Amino acid sequence: MKTSRLQKTKQLTVAGMAALAATSSLVAEDAKPDPRPNILFIFSDDHALKTIGAYNPEYTADNPLNATPNIDRIAEEGAVFTRSFCTNSICQPSRASVLTGKHSHKNGVWGNGAPWDNQQWVFTRELAKNGYQTAMIGKWHMHPYPSTEFDYHKTLTGYGGQGRYYQPLFINHDGQEVQETGYSTDLITDYSIEWMENRDKTKPFLMMCQYKAPHTNVMPALRHLREFKEDIPVPDTYFDNFDGRSEYLKHTWMSMHGLQVPEVLKISPKLGEYDREKLHHTNPYHYMVPLTLEEAKAWHKHYDPMNDDYNKRRAEGKLQDGSKELSIYRYQRYMNDYMAVIDGVDENVGRLMKYLDDEGIADNTIIIYSSDQGFLLGEHGITDKRVALEESMMMPFIIRWPGHIKPGQRNDAMIQNIDYAPTFLEAAGIEIPADVQGRSLLPVFQGETPDDWRTSIYYHYHQTGEYNLPKIESVRSKRYKLNRYYGHRDPELAKLGEQWELFDLDKDPQELNNLYNNPEMAPVRQEMKEELDKLREQYEVQEQE
């Protein structure tokens, strides 16, 4: 980890950091700090709740699925929101909803690739107008890149805007593309700490530290490569065939059973059995391309024995294509890498928290850990998001604010990512615009949910055709969920027409028993349809074809 860069002057700060430093030097020595809270927003990508200790109190030190001690510390000293949902479970739309406090149909980012209107209202610009210093470092993903949304930004680029884990490319604040040396999660933390160190310390700040990890293609830091274990519990629904539910789900391209073996599972020829230089030209997106020779040697030292064993088993007639045995093996390989990548995220969360502690500003800093959406890790045989299943819709939201949030609480208020923007504004004492669709969470921070708080959430996935899915509209109450599938762009699949699902989440938390056509559930079905219509009206949803 390149912590030494924090003691060195780097070109990474470019014009934006230079301007900030110049401004800081003009501040009078006796200037008093603004008492409003700082905000450190840590945002990962595709972080499944089942791999966060704070969301799984049944885990023990001797038997964790995955240990996340630093993320858990935020929870222990703050609050875990157990009913936290995204509005549209896909990268770009979720980020737009966080910034605008609005659903996708209002902010215009309905799917990945939809253009970002960089002139629309965002809470970050509002904070800056009211005396906050604002910065975003890491994954942005939207198009175009940031302009005036932040005082300073340094964003990942390449790989479709995802960035890569090793030797990532960044767009600096001045628009210059630079390739940095190191591991993405470490570098984003380095740059975030350096910006906080060089800011004007008489003013409050917003730092949005946004990791690529643990987004596929999961590549751990070399120090986190772990011994391969094949004992990770396989989800009960791993071999789900979706009988009785929407036929569209049987056609998705998100199956963990068919993961691309070389790219996702790191099963590739040994070092020396392929031409590294040729690979750069013939397949520039191959996961091995960014690695230096020394990194590649360490990588192969770890993975080659596993791959030798894989090939040996295949030669012995095991792990055959289409077998459950191979499917479970793929799950184990993926999960080992996924959790190792999260080791890097958690370690860097600890570095950020240590910085706050060392600077003596932790008590006046709101720190949030969240992710752009949830993620299915083999549940229902899926490895992705998008669908209106709990593991996809639910996103982590863990927050610490000393003196304002009772430590150790588990809050079951229904919240969404559209609530983040108004929450940050109210915490800063700034008026919330009337057209923001989310609601400030300050009233629920002490564990008491107001009587008029929402009792259901609205979800809408718009990107028809992607991963062979139709559009999906959903309303989720505390007990029930109603899903509507419609509008597939493929002419043949579109013949399936509109399809509905209804689940009783109290009795069926795995969403296996579709009750939509059950006559006994007619009153609930009608109630949920009325709730859907109410939310459409509330959020001004026009698209209902």
Image: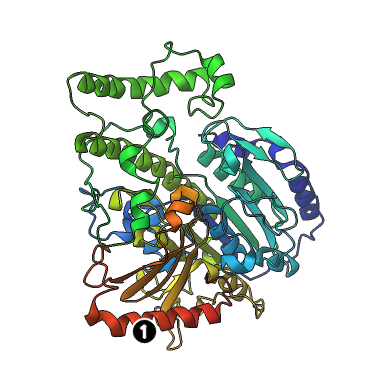
Residue 262 to residue 111: above or below: above
Residue 120 place in picture, x, y as percent: 71, 65
Q: Residue 216 versus residue 192: which sits nearer the camera?
A: 216
The mark total stands at: 1
Query: Which percent across, then down, holds residue 228?
Result: 27, 32
Asked if residue 145 lies left or right of residue 242, the reply is right
**Which is more toward the observer, 117 or 185?**
117
Colouring convention used in this rendered image of the protein: rainbow
Task: Give the vertical position of 215 relative to 493 (above or below).
Answer: above
Q: Decide which of 108, 372 is in the foreground and name it.
A: 108
Residue pushed farthest bottom?
451
> SS class of the residue under badge 1?
helix
Q: Residues within 10 Å of mark 1 (few under 14, many from 20)?
A: few
Return the x and y of residue 73 as percentages of the image width and height.
39, 57
Which residue is under mark 1?
527
Task: Identify the residue shown where x is 27% and y is 64%.
Answer: 511
Location of residue 510 by image quarter? bottom left
Is residue 458 rendered to the left or right of residue 315? Answer: right
Q: Residue at x 56, y 68 (%)?
A: 103
